[in-house]
Image (tube, rainbow, N blue to C red):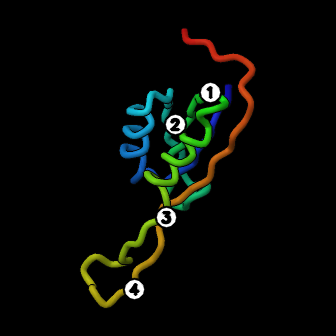
Amino acid sequence: MKLLIAMISPDDVNAVCAALTKSRFGVRHIATSRAFLEAGTATLLISAKDEKVEEALRILKESAGVHQRRTDSYDSIQPMTEEGGGCVFVVNAEQFVVL
């Protein structure tokens, strides 16, 4: 059993949680602020069987990967900037108990 600790943009939380839940992963969302991504982050705790870790990582990359966005939505001349992304720690979970 593995515990994935994912820190992602709050803008991506709904899509990520929906995709992970659809694929039957256990997900818990913890709101955090002023850390990895300056505007704040969302921390997800994801439980996965050892053989399902790569699938969970794929879902995270697809749902919370880096995407392009204009810095000023009112000015079409502004260049596109990269947003999103995040980081994931994968750690061994010795025991998982549902209360």
Per the model, the C-alpha gap separating discs 1 and 4 is: 42 Å
From the image, which quarter does the C terminus lie in?
top right
- Residue at which label 3 appears: 66
- Residue at which label 1 appears: 49
Q: Residue placed at 64% from the left, 32% from the top?
A: 51
* x and y percentages locating residue 95 in the rendered image: 70, 17
The one of 32 and 12 positioned closer to us in this rendering: 12
From the image, which quarter does the N terminus lie in?
top right
Q: Residue placed at 59% from the left, 34% from the top?
A: 52
Q: Is residue 97 above or below residue 84?
A: above
Residue type marked 1:
Lys
- Does label 1 or label 4 sit earlier along the sequence? 1
Image quadrant in which you'd find residue 53: top right
Q: Are marks 1 and 3 in contact (CB under 8 Å)?
A: no
Q: Are marks 1 and 2 in contact (CB under 8 Å)?
A: no
**What SS does tag 4 mark?**
loop
- Does label 1 or label 2 sit earlier along the sequence? 2
Per the model, the C-alpha gap separating discs 2 and 4 is: 32 Å
Q: Is residue 91 left or right of residue 16?
A: right
